[in-house]
Image (tube, grey):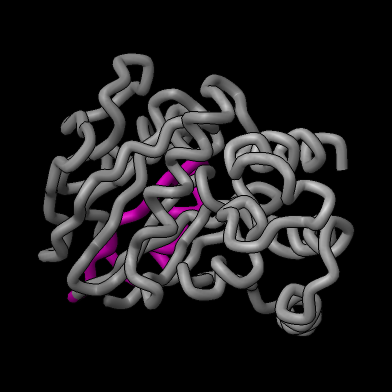
């Protein structure tokens, strides 16, 4: 599976799956960014996949529907304009010949879903799981977001993780403040090198995130070890909100 990113806004990535001259895009908040790629690379737009209703993930849908061939797949949320196929937990669909399974991952928003391709071990997780972090709570509860992340951490270790924002360095800076850990510090140095070269930090993987992402509850700061995993997660999320 060939996947590339289309930069949008300040730190958004519109992930694109390419096959035989066609692409399907995930969370196209900026139509012009996608249209430019279609023109410059002589590509056709097949499908659009939407993880949740926030405008930086959906803003380009209306314009892109004028040039696309297939469907807009997204959450079962009537507030999202342009959805052709509404999806819920365990639904399956195909784009460009790749089969995806839907995982409901509420917390950041109530309608948030993620897309997992078992055959290729690929996860598009929007704003639920970030490299080294997780999404803020806008609509859901701490328990919902905790449960959503626990779903994702149970995916195979070699699952590639494609999230929608370049937040990795800031997330790792927060993690370093919370815990002294060589794996986190070394990974942060590697990310700094990549970013300084003009590269991006993504994709990550479930295996990597288990080592560097405190929100997956594989590593716990010493001052939170007396708490349950759910309580520790809530405290970490509150701390990150104020970081």
Residue 33 shown left or right of residue 117 in the figure: right
**Foreground of the two, 202 or 45:** 202
Residue 72 shown left or right of residue 38 in the figure: left
Q: Is residue 39 magenta?
A: yes
Count of marks placed on residues: 0
Q: Position of residue 11 (x, y in %)?
A: 67, 53
- Judge whether residue 108 can be spotted in this image: yes
Query: Which residues are drawn in magenta?
Result: 20-43
Question: Residue at left 44%, top 28%?
Answer: 53
**Foreground of the two, 83 or 231:** 231
Residue 56 shown left or right of residue 74 in the figure: right
In the rendered image, the vertical position of residue 4 relative to residue 130, given as above or below = below
- Judge whether residue 197 can be spotted in this image: no
**Foreground of the two, 41 or 129:** 129
Question: Residue at left 29%, top 71%?
Answer: 121
The quadrant the C terminus occupies is top right
Question: Residue at left 49%, top 66%?
Answer: 5
Query: Which residue lies most toward the top here?
Result: 78
In the rendered image, the vertical position of residue 141 relative to residue 178, given as above or below = above
Picture quadrant where residue 67 is located? top left
Q: Position of residue 108 (x, y in %)?
A: 54, 32
């Amino acid at each position: 599976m060939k996947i590339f990113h289309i930069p949008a806004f300040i730190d958004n990535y519109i992930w694109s799956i390419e096959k035989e001259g066609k692409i399907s895009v995930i969370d196209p908040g900026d139509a012009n960014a996608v249209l430019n790629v279609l023109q410059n690379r002589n590509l056709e737009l097949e499908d659009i996949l939407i993880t949740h209703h926030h405008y930086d993930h959906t803003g380009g849908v209306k314009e892109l529907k004028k040039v696309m061939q297939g469907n807009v797949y997204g959450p079962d949320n009537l507030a999202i304009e342009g959805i052709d196929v509404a999806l819920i937990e365990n639904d399956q669909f195909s784009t460009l010949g790749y089969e995806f399974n839907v995982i409901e991952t509420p917390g950041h928003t109530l309608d948030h879903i993620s897309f997992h391709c078992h055959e290729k071990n690929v996860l598009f997780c929007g704003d639920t799981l970030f490299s080294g972090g997780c999404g803020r709570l806008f609509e859901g509860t701490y328990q919902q977001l905790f449960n959503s992340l626990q779903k994702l951490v149970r995916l195979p270790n070699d699952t590639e993780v494609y999230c929608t924002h370049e937040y990795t360095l800031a997330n790792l800076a927060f993690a370093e403040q919370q815990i002294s850990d060589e794996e986190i510090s070394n990974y942060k140095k590697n990310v700094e090198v990549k970013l300084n070269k003009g590269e991006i930090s993504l994709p990550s993987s479930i295996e990597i995130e288990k080592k560097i992402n405190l929100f997956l509850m594989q590593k716990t700061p010493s001052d939170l070890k007396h708490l349950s995993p759910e309580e520790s997660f809530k405290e970490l999320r509150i701390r990150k909100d104020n970081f």
